[in-house]
Image (spheres, rainbow, N blue to C red):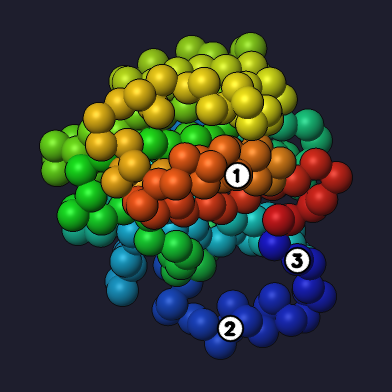
Amino acid sequence: MPKAPKWFNDTVETLLGSKMPRVKVTETEYLNPFIKRIRLQGELNDWHCHAGYATGVRISDTEYRNYTPSFDDVENGIVELIVHLHGDGPGSRYMNNLSIGDELKLIMPRGKKVYSEDVKQYFFFGDETTLAMACALNERAKKNKALLHFYFELDAENKNIPAILGLDNYSVFSKNKTLANVELVNQLPMFQMPGYKEATFIVSGNATSVQTVRRAIKQYGVSGSIIAQAYWAAGKTGL
């Protein structure tokens, strides 16, 4: 998200008031040194979070970052985030430093609706930055008995994270290889699966991989939806 002057962000928070839920960190867990699960709790009045929506967190006086909830329970006031700690960026520093008892405000969730109960087959493409969305989708797909296969491009140290998160029916590839090459994407077994043309394809994460996978899928003339959303791009801040 873009930067804004401190006075502007302060004014926005004052104007929004109750529309920015105040939550407290109740649990934190490092799944490994690079992936952190954070549980927040507070009053979630008017909170409506579809799978794939993102909430905003003010990480400094001048900056916000978007995070997709992996789980939310409005009745009990619970929101869970799964964040990727990478490098020494301001978002990573902020999330790494969050500990039990810390308080923060959340911007109401917004974004693209990526899940529909009418769709019975999904293919999901993503990386570390989209693990939370994968968890949110997985929960809904299981309840609706929909088929869902995950294709992740992950750094070697994170290849076991999908299993730790309880995801199944997934494939893991190295970064900047399979999902960055149209010809290799075209060789994925999903294109041999019954009904794949009517499936919904959710393509997220790195902007280059999103463009590549989307182009490969379109070559097959699918009639289902292709929902593409880049979370980050090399050399760009706050996509």
Relative placement, left or right, of 142 versus 63 is: left
Q: Amino acid at mark 3?
A: Pro
Question: Label 1, on which residue?
Answer: 215
| Structural distance between the alpha carbons of marks 2 and 3 | 19 Å
The residue closer to the viewer here, 89 or 201, is 201
- In the image, farthest residue toward the bottom: 15
First in sequence, mark 2 or 1: give its number: 2
Mark 2 vs mark 3: give the one in front: 3
Residue 6 vertical placement versus 211 (above, below): below
Which quadrant of the figure has residue 216? top right
Question: Label 3, on which residue?
Answer: 2
| Structural distance between the alpha carbons of marks 2 and 1 | 44 Å
Total number of numbered discs in the rendering: 3
The image shows residue 28 at horizontal and vertical percentages of 47, 32
Q: Provide the secondary structure element on which disc 1 rests.
A: helix
Residue 4 in view (yes/no): yes
**Residue at point 56%, 27% (across, down):** 185
The image shows residue 190 at horizontal and vertical percentages of 39, 26
The residue closer to the viewer here, 226 or 34, is 226
Relative placement, left or right, of 9 versus 229 is: right
Question: Label 2, on which residue?
Answer: 14
